[in-house]
């Protein structure tokens, strides 16, 4: 009798589970600008939610929009990278009020260092072009 009950529960849950999987569309590449895997992971996990086309905060998108970063000219990309470096070094990104609400969004020292080093290297590479 217990096996039948488990089977019944499993069969009842199966349509809901398959429906949930069927509704989940494949996610497009979030960040198309080329960057190393570790940098991209930090950017997606800690920065992307506020800096993409779907975000309502126009100020956040104006400073950095991952959906358009790869389409900017060299001068604008350099300005964005300089801004990223300054904001991270000041401890202004992510904003404290956001981190208070979402503590997992806070950058660790290692993540902040990784991003700053990457934008410095990326800026230097752009200047050589």
Image (spheres, rainbow, N blue to C red):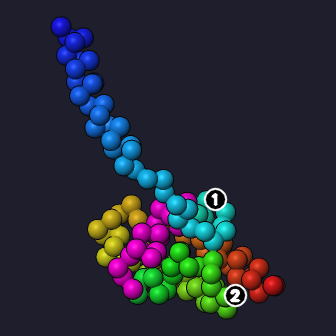
Provide residue 12's location: percent of width, then percent of height.
23, 28
Which quadrant: the N terminus? top left
Q: Residue furthest top?
A: 1
18 relative to 120 in the view: left or right? left
Task: Specify whether 108 is left or right of 2.
Answer: right
In the displayed structure, 83 sits above or below 53; it is: below
**Residue ID for mark 2:** 74
Magenta part of the chain: 41-58
Q: Is residue 53 magenta?
A: yes
Helix, strand or loop at mark 2 = helix
Mark 1 highlights which residue? 37
> In front: 27, or 38?
27
Q: Nearer the viewer, residue 80 or 104?
A: 80
**Is any part of residue 24 visible from this angle?**
yes
Q: Position of residue 7 (x, y in %)?
A: 26, 18
Residue under the point 77% across and 87% down:
127
Q: Nearer the viewer, mark 2 or mark 1?
A: 2
Q: Secondary structure at mark 1?
A: helix
Nearer to the camera, 70 or 95:
70
On the image, which quarter does residue 57 sit in?
bottom left
Crowd rating for badge 1 (residues with CA inside 10 Å; few <14, some 14–19, many 20+): few
Mark 2 or mark 1: whose residue is earlier in sequence: 1
Q: Secondary structure of the magenta portion, mostly?
A: helix
Q: Residue at x 62, y 90 (%)?
A: 76
Q: Quadrant of residue 126?
A: bottom right
What number of labels is visible? Answer: 2
Q: Quadrant of the C terminus?
A: bottom right
Q: Which residue appears at 56% of the width and 79% of the height?
A: 68
Q: Quadrant of residue 113?
A: bottom right
Q: Residue at x 63, y 71 (%)?
A: 33
- Label 2 and label 1: CA atoms lie apart by 22 Å
């Amino acid at each position: 009798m217990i096996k039948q009950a488990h089977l019944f529960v499993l069969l009842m849950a199966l349509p809901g589970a398959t429906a949930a999987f069927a509704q989940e569309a494949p996610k497009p590449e979030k960040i198309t600008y080329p960057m190393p895997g570790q940098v991209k992971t930090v950017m997606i996990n800690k920065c992307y939610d506020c800096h993409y086309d779907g975000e309502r905060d126009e100020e956040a998108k104006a400073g950095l929009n991952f959906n358009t970063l790869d389409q900017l000219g060299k001068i604008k990309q350099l300005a964005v990278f300089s801004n990223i470096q300054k904001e991270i070094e000041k401890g202004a990104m992510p904003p404290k009020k956001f981190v208070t609400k979402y503590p997992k969004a806070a950058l660790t020292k290692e993540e902040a260092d990784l991003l700053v080093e990457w934008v410095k290297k990326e800026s230097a590479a752009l200047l050589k072009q």
